[in-house]
Image (spheres, rainbow, N blue to C red):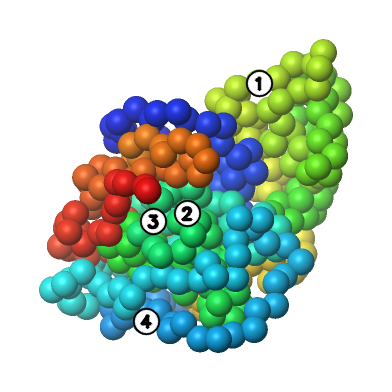
Amino acid sequence: MQSNYSKKPRKNRRNRNAKSLFIKAFAIAFVVFSTLVAGVVSVNTFVITPPEIPSINPGLIAASPEDTEYERPASYDPEYTEEDWLIGGGLIAPAGFTNEDRKELFYTFLIMGLDEGINVDTIMVASYDGVNAKANIISIPRDSLVNVSRRVRKINVAFPAGYLRDGGRDGGIAQMQREIMSIIGFVPDFYVLIDLEAFVKMVDAVGGIEIEVPFHMRYDDPFQDLFIDIPEGLQHMDGETALQFARFRRGNTGFRSITDYQRIENQQKVISAMLSNLIQPASILRIPEFISIFSEHVHTDISLSDMMWFASQLTIVSGLESLSTHTIPTDGTSGAPRWYEFLHGPGIVEMVNQTINPFTIDIELSDLDIIREYN
């Protein structure tokens, strides 16, 4: 179900990254199915109890500048430099909020999708309401402007900034938490970090998927090492081909191109086909392989016992009818050269309070750190 929130029209909207859209769709499908299968197994083996509501974090303290030697990973954001590190100063929960203000059986999650190496293409905040069996997912554009002091002030740079400055994956996650809080007013209870390779392996694990291709898709981009050549008609796709189908937008000269909206429809076809295969009884036999893929490509602070509870809860949700997806409200872009997405604070407050706010008290605009200017 799509969000009904109104947003001010964007200005100078440029094309969105196909991989970012696809990772979002896949992450939803992957999490739903993984918990579904795990729940079936767990409910029949042992009694599980609800996770404890995490206590309010007393503060996420930013690291102080130091003279540090940096080792640049093989894959990194080309706009990122060693000086682009910081960032946030001791953000805490909104003033006056206490652990007693938490909603019963209401949990929140920060979900990040890695493209290659340490590049974050997808950022989402999800919630699960265990009392009403409702789930919400809010997507945050990777180009969202955040109030930080580094040269590149996009939210997706938070992970590589923390990764390089504070030391590895955990440092990247901590930095992302700081900057997410400046946007939504709180730090989600749990985090999930997933890479795109998981999708390719999952499709292969279920024996591929069948997709009706509307026309011959042909696109070559040596710079991205991307070569798409998918004939028209019903095609049985392995994981790599399915990923290419989901990414396709622009065709070579003489071949058709599609709009972003058509590409989204194609991505939905891929997800539907994958889910159709995953829910087959034969998939139960592949659980060890699914677990292997999950352990290799997903990093999370959700414990196994807590994961089992979330799994058992999601099995009672009827399909995706109780899962609503939204995009955080924005209000135009900065234009060239950075193309920052300006966040719409009042719209964010409304959306957060009606979907993912884990507190019985409303988040207010003053609890956020939204800026509307880029110099």
Q: Amino acid at mark 2?
A: Lys
Residue 197 lies in what quarter of the image? bottom right
- Residue drawn 61% across the image and 55% down it: 79
Q: Does residue 330 sit above or below 94 in this rendering?
A: above
The image shows residue 352 at horizontal and vertical percentages of: 28, 52
Give the mark nearest the N terminus, 1 or 3: 3
- Residue drawn 60% across the image and 74% down it: 164
Q: Which mark is residue 154?
A: 2
Name the residue carrying label 4. 61
Asked whether the residues under the numbered discs 3 and 2 touch, taking CB atoms below 8 Å apart as contact, a structural biologist would say yes
Q: Which mark is residue 146?
A: 3
Q: Amino acid at mark 1?
A: Ile
Q: Secondary structure at mark 3?
A: loop
Give the mark nearest the N terminus, 1 or 2: 2
Q: Can residue 22 be seen here?
A: no
Q: Secondary structure at mark 4?
A: loop
